[in-house]
Image (spheres, rainbow, N blue to C red):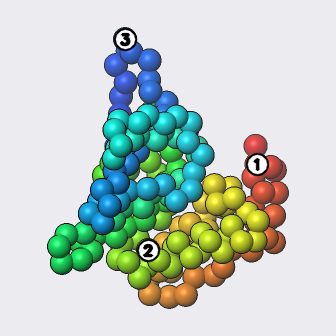
Amino acid sequence: MTGQTLSHPQDATTPPDRLTHVNLIWIEQRVEHWIRFGDEAEERIIDRRRRVLSFSPDSVFAFVHWVANEHGSVLSRVTILRAVTPGQPYQTVPSVRPGGEILLAIGGWPKVERVLQAIDAIEAIGIDPTEVSLDHWRHLHNRLTAGQEPRAYSRLQHRAFLLRRRAAP
């Protein structure tokens, strides 16, 4: 996985910013950052090409980062993160402040496309990707990184996850 694990001490005189901020840029066919899924808590529009979406602690979101030049794609990346609470350790991710818990980080268009298809399949069975088991995103990351076929997320698996989460203290 990419990123560096950090813990950011807050200045005692300022209240901690509890949100995770993602800088989004859209310059058609050059730089395209977007959120594939996630429930943003705030949005700040900077100009017609830039905005900042902010996420509450423990929320899960997918950030897609694509860059091209005159010769074609230079970078394709999808990162699924869990926003952290101030004081929790986190991993840094470009364009994400302060960072988050990385559940999946995949680069290269063929693998990014596989992740986007997996998200589509989860939505197709009526499950919100923000509610999916964190372990499933890790599984998807590990299997795609190893060049193996990931298991599809099922309603039965989701139900078991929800029951375990409800039973946890």
- Kindly check if marks 3 and 2 are in contact, taking CB atoms under 8 A apart as contact: no
- Kindly check if marks 1 and 3 are in contact, taking CB atoms under 8 A apart as contact: no
Q: Whole-Å distance between the Cαs marked 3 and 2? A: 42 Å
Q: Whole-Å distance between the Cαs marked 1 and 3? A: 35 Å
Q: Whole-Å distance between the Cαs marked 2 and 1? A: 33 Å
The answer to whether residue 72 is left or right of residue 77 is: left
Q: Residue at 36% of width from left, 28% of height from top? A: 9
| Nearer to me, 27 or 100 | 27
Position of residue 71 measured from the top left corner of the image (x, y, whole percent): 18, 78
- Give the labeled residue for mark 3: 13
- Type of the residue with mark 1: Ala
- The N terminus, quarter of image: bottom left
- Give the labeled residue for mark 1: 168
- Give the labeled residue for mark 2: 112
| Nearer to me, 70 or 75 | 70
Q: Residue at 38% of width from left, 48% of height from top? A: 24
The answer to whether residue 13 is left or right of residue 75 is: right
